[in-house]
């Protein structure tokens, strides 16, 4: 099986940069839909206030999601140390095991890569991404895999056969990698999204909290402690 150190390192570096860009694009889409969701809620509140004869001024403080650069770096790191090298080794291994070319050979290679080796890619990638998060623990990594593995893997099995078939119609390893980066962009963005949704326990704990409006309230003025004491209860120092 011909493996080149230069080829593996180059694939890793390109995959790392690619991973940062993919996650950045995924976050921009998430931020866009978050702003749209908040705008609809705000319009609904204004319409309700108008029907009730209240001022249409909205006093609710909406919380917008912010871009998380650490998440992009984390996704890029996983692509650098795992996805890139493993892709180069995987494509080289498959081409070495199945040395024929053509549509039939491409179909066999697609089945081996997607349905046999695919779960390894998903398991290690998801686990490593979760492990790199701040405060990560082994139980959290296991919980993330239990929640997301089958969802991500089944989505790949359903939507990637044509993409993978086209990849293995390409002649060399580098050509396969380029086609994979181009055709797999949207799937990579989906994986990035799924790896950063709340774990089931966290979702249940915060369920509905985003819909609770935060009103601008002024803190109540409290009387000094000695005034509260003399006004509400007898004070032995004053002989009462």
Image: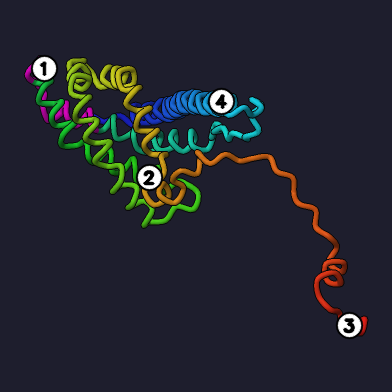
Which of labels 1 and 3 is toward the front?
3
The residue nearer to you, when weighing 55 against 62, is 55
Residue behind mark 2 = 128
Query: For the stretch drawn in magenta, what is the main secondary structure?
Result: helix
CB-based contact (under 8 Å), mark 2 and mark 4: no
The range drawn in magenta is: 90-104
**Real-space Cα distance between discs 1 and 4?**
69 Å
**Real-space Cα distance between discs 1 and 2?**
34 Å
Residue behind mark 4 = 51
Q: Position of residue 102 (x, y in %)?
A: 10, 14
Could you tell whether 35 is left or right of 151 in the image?
right
Judged from the image, the secondary structure of the residue bearing numbered disc 1 is: loop
CB-based contact (under 8 Å), mark 4 and mark 3: no
The first of marks 1 and 4 along the sequence is: 4
Which of labels 1 and 4 is toward the front?
4
Q: Is residue 99 magenta?
A: yes
Could you tell whether 231 is left or right of 126 in the image?
right
Give the number of the disc on residue 240: 3
Judged from the image, the secondary structure of the residue bearing numbered disc 4 is: helix
The first of marks 1 and 3 along the sequence is: 1
The first of marks 2 and 4 along the sequence is: 4
**Real-space Cα distance between discs 2 and 4?**
52 Å
């Amino acid at each position: 099986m011909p493996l080149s150190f230069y080829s593996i390192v180059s694939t890793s570096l390109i995959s790392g940069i690619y991973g940062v860009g993919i996650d950045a694009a995924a976050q921009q889409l998430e931020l866009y839909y978050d702003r749209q969701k908040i705008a609809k809620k705000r319009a609904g509140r204004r319409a309700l206030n108008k029907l009730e004869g209240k001022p249409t001024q909205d006093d609710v403080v909406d919380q917008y999601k912010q871009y998380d650069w650490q998440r992009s770096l984390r996704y890029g790191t996983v692509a650098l140390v795992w996805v890139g090298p493993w892709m180069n080794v995987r494509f080289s291994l498959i081409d070495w095991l199945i040395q024929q070319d053509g549509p039939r050979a491409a179909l066999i290679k697609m089945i081996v890569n997607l349905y046999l080796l695919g779960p390894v890619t998903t398991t290690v990638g998801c686990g490593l991404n979760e492990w790199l998060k701040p405060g990560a623990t082994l139980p959290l990594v296991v919980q993330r895999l239990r929640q997301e593995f089958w969802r991500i893997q089944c989505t790949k099995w359903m939507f990637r056969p044509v993409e993978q078939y086209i990849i293995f119609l390409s002649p060399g390893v580098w050509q396969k990698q380029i086609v994979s980066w181009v055709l797999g962009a949207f799937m990579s963005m989906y994986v990035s999204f799924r790896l950063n949704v709340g774990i089931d326990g966290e979702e249940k704990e915060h369920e509905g909290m985003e819909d609770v409006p935060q009103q601008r309230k002024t803190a109540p003025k409290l009387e000094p402690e000695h005034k509260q004491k003399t006004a509400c209860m007898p004070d032995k120092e004053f002989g009462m």
